[in-house]
Amino acid sequence: MRLRDDFYWGNSVSSMQTEGAWNEGGKGKSVYDIRKASKNASDWKVATDSYHRYQEDFDYMQDLGMNMYRFQISWSRVNPQGNGEWNEEGIAFYDQFIDELIARGIEPMICLYHFDMPLYLAEKYNGFISKEVVDAFIRYGKEMVDRFGHKVKHWLTFNEQNIFSMPDEGFRVAGYLAGEKTLEELYQIQHNTMFCHASIANYIHTNTDAKISGMLAYQEVYPATSHPEDVRLAREFDEFMNHHYLEMFSKGKRSDSYLKFIDNQKFNLNISEIELEEIAHLRSDYLSFSYYSSTTIDHTKVPEDTAPNAYMQFGKKDNPYIDTTEWNWQIDPDGFRDVLNKIYQRYHLPVFPIENGIGVIEEWDGEHPIEDDYRIAYHKEHLLALMKAVNQDGVDVLGYLGWGLIDILSSQGDMRKRYGVVYVNRENHDLKDLKRVPKKSYDWLKQVIHTNGDYLLK
């Protein structure tokens, strides 16, 4: 039960959930900067103030023994309008940010887009439905590669790219502010973002020695029963939400079922031969994904003419055989092992889980470390599942990055949902002092990392 000697241990975050400083350093507004606070959500103006405190956070990561940090460049921080002049102050911030990581022996991984569309592009062009925004993103991505590719050797374009296939959610993360949200538009956004990804990936492979991966939020969905229709819907959903993207990332090829669906729907998508040629050259150096939970699908709840990528809007059903979190995310380490196998055994590329963790409501008494044994149990069970995938199934796994291991705002802006092994002392509507306080899980994770996983077996 061994892991490779160069196994990556680390932390993943986004810019809007960490940085704050929404109006400092020449930053332009993103779509997040205009979102208002609500009862159970903060605004995004301060987040965890990592813009000013990142060196303290890096010191915790170094003490833990982490050797990789996946972070996101804020598009509107380096280019306030998204398609205009470069903000050299913002670029200098990330240049120093990267140097501070490297100085601590922590390898940077850059993600270019985590759903925070520059507000100007969202309001003027309606986000990634527009070819103007496609061109702006490719220009932005290539500029960041030119600026940082000599010292950053791991890149992502889009966080959880298959979210662009999810009805409603896909429009929100694409910076789409107004329109009918038709299924045809959703498939246009899918294509546009894949062309963006291919353009940047091919540019990296042509001009640098860096590596790039396609990333998705793997949707692990089981049939609710042994009824053949449950089995069929689970398979079709897996194909449209997971393998369609993985085929593109690894082979530059759309799945036949996806192409047939577009043909049957008589979609009139704006796709050029140049774009198809760019996508055809797409390859990944490894395949990365996020994994938190699994669920099941019940065919009796799904209307007959529902698109496969929308099945779970209707057919989701809790699995009675596994536990759940207070957010009803079902805890399934065996599903994690299954996903590692399904990706590696089908595509034969190294696999890299770059998000995993458990979000829990926690309160600090101001004195004692939080006793988060549930977090220790969650990570231990998932890491043991990973080790079984490596040592019993032969999966080539590059590393394991936890999500927000220093507390951050949740994806919905809710500071109550905490993933970290380090507590950040703020609430949704009270910033307090933003003090960093290690939890019980901090010392446990430190021993796991410093022994390259051997501590899990004791």
Image (cartoon, rainbow, N blue to C red):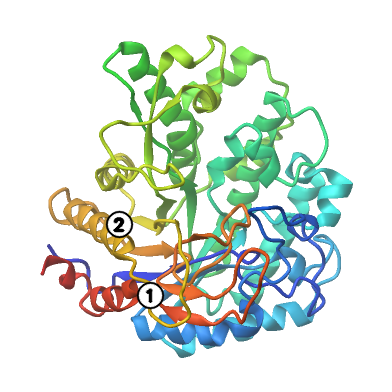
Dot 1 amino acid type: Lys
Left or right for 26, reference 390: right
Relative side of 405 to 340, left or right: right
Q: Please name the residue shown 51% across and 32% down the image.
A: 254
Identify the residue at image location x=67%, y=32%: 186
Report x, y in % for residue 147: 66, 76
* Residue 106 visible in the snapshot: no
Q: Is residue 190 visible?
A: yes
Nearer to us in this view, 433 or 300:
433
Label 1 CA crowd tier, 10 Å (few <14, some 14–19, many 20+): many
The residue beneath circle 2 is 378
**Residue 24: % across, % down:** 79, 78
Q: Tell me the SS state at disc 1.
A: loop
Residue 334 drawn above or below residue 153: above
> Where does label 1 land, which residue?
439
Q: CA distance from mark 1 to mark 2?
A: 15 Å
Q: Is residue 94 left or right of residue 236?
A: right
Are the two marked residues, 1 and 2, in contact with CB atoms closer than 8 angstroms? no
Pointer 1 or 2: first along the chain: 2
Q: Amino acid at mark 2?
A: Tyr
Q: Quadrant of residue 75?
A: bottom right
Across and down, in percent, residue 106 comes to: 43, 80
Q: 185 and 374: which one is in front? A: 374
Percent of width and height locating residue 424: 52, 74
Residue positioned most to the bottom: 103
Q: Residue at x 71, y 53 (%)?
A: 38
